[in-house]
Amino acid sequence: MNIGFRILPVKQRINKGVVKQFRNIVTPHISDNMNRLHAGGTELQPFHKEGKLLGTAITVKTRPGDNLMVHKALDLALPGDVIVVDAGGDTTNAIVGEIMQRIAKKKGIAGFVINGAIRDSLAFMEDTFPVYAKGVTHRGPYKDGPGEVNGPISLGGMIINSGDLIVGDEDGLVAVPAEEVEGVLLKAKEQEKKEKEIFRLIEDGKISRSWVDEVLKEKGCKFEKDHEPILTGRGNLK
């Protein structure tokens, strides 16, 4: 088995048509419809100029400061894949830089997620090629191993398997299990419709805020005499 130093196949790949439908879905809508428990952590921030990260995960687990297996993942990745690297969150050495960025762009790879550091940061910040990382350092990586490609990894408590859907925008990162993407997509689209209706009600001055006092009352909040709860209509728009 050689656990810890091996290359595994991608478990499954999501239909490209389904992936494309997530292009205009924001991460909050995805997160809300996975009970708000799946997130890449606030420490992983975008370092690119602009643009959404979207694609199928090629996962890499490597020891801090070493990118040998990241290079192998770069060779194995297909157009539309996202290389997601758990380098232990250590920022002593960079895991990717401009050379790997250029190779990835040429291959049509969708982006990088690095639980560690990058370097040549200006090349990323001036480009729309998506990259999320924990930090920046000029110190380069080693290429000794060990590591794994396409094994399960964890970022910010979020378990990611190869083949899962990776989505990143201004609010952060989320991974959708490959077997759950269609269900999450439907729920996220429905939430988007509901929010648009809320926005319309706000603009028309018809939004109800009665739900706030109702929830407070249900939870036992005491209302002083100079404040009477508003109980006209549920209007539970959170």
Image: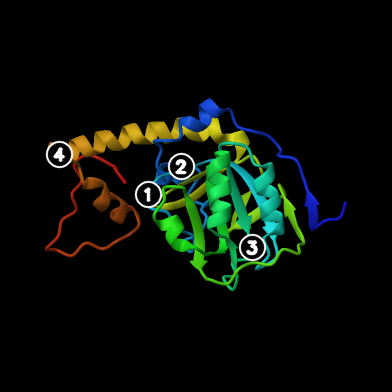
Looking at the image, is 42 positioned above or below residue 59?
A: below
Q: Nearer the viewer, residue 137 or 52?
A: 137
Residue type (three-letter) at the residue carrying disc 3:
Ala
Q: Mark 3 or mark 2, which is nearer the start of the sequence?
A: 2
- Residue at x 45% of width, y 33% of height: 187
Residue shown at 13% from the left, 36% from the top: 204
Q: Which residue is mark 3?
A: 87
What is the spatial separation of the Cα atoms under label 2 and label 3, in whole angstroms?
25 Å
The amino acid pointed to by label 4 is Glu
In space, the residues marked 3 and 4 are separated at their CA atoms by: 47 Å
Q: Residue furthest top?
A: 17
- Residue at image mark 4: 203
Which mark is first along the chain, 4 or 3? 3
Using the image, determine if residue 131 lies above or below residue 81: below
**Going from the N terminus, do you reach mark 3 or mark 1 first?**
1
Picture coordinates of residue 65, whole percent (x, y): 65, 68
Mark 4 and mark 1 in contact? Answer it, CB < 8 Å: no
Q: Nearer the viewer, mark 4 or mark 1?
A: 1
Give the structural element (helix, strand or loop) at label 1. loop
Residue bearing the label numbered 1: 50
| Label 3 packing within 10 angstroms: few (<14), some (14-19), many (20+) | many
